[in-house]
Image: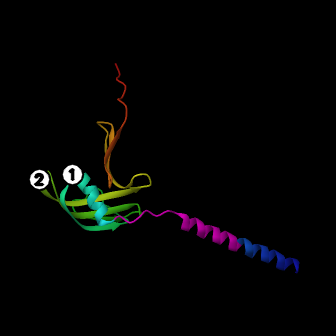
Amino acid sequence: MVPNQAGTLVLLSFVLLSSSCQQTKVSEIARPPELSKHDAKRILTHEGYKNVVVAAVITGCSLAPRSPQLQFVSAAPNVACVVGLGELGGELKEIQQELFYDTEYGWMYYEIDKERRVVRRWTTSGYSKEGLAEAPRTR
C-alpha cells in the first residue's frame, strides 16, 4: 500500500468510527414514554378532579405563560399539555394543564409553595409533598 493511501484509509476509518459513535450517542438519549389519556386522567383525579374527560394529550407542547386563552409554544418531549373537562370543588372546569416527565416520578404535575416551603407532586401513583425545614428566625 502506498503511504498516501494508508493515510486516507486511516482518515476514512476515523470518520466512519466518529460518525457511528455520534449516532450511538443520539440513539442512547432516553425519550420519555408517551403520556396516555388514561395516565393523564389518573393524575388529574389525584389532584381532586372528578368525572374527568381528557380530550387530548399534546406531547412536546407547553402552554404559553399567563395566557388568557389556550396557546401552545414548542417544548421538549418531557412536557405534555392535557386538555379536557372535569369537576373540581363541585364546579365544572375546563382543564388546560402541563404535565412533566421526571425519570424518578414519571409523568407528574407539581406546585411549589414558597410560603409553606413545600413542593407538592401528583403522579399516576398519587400525591406526595416534600418540605424544607423551618427557616431560622432572626431577632
Residue 64's place in the image compared with 56, above or below, is above
Looking at the figure, which quarter contains the N terminus?
A: bottom right
Type of amino acid under label 2: Gly
Residue found 55% across the figure and 67% down from its top: 26
- Secondary structure found at label 1: loop
Q: Position of residue 23 (x, y in %)?
A: 59, 70
Q: Which residues are magenta?
A: 15-35
Residue located farthest toward the front when viewing the structure as drawn: 125
Membership of 17 in magenta stretch:
yes
- Secondary structure found at label 2: loop
Q: Position of residue 80 (x, y in %)?
A: 34, 62
Ranked by sequence position, the earlier of labels 2 and 1 is 1
Type of amino acid under label 1: Gly
Q: Which residue is mark 2?
A: 90
Which numbered tag is attached to residue 48?
Answer: 1
Relative to 18, is 50 on the left or the right? left
Viewer-proximal residue among 75 and 13: 13
Q: How many marks?
A: 2
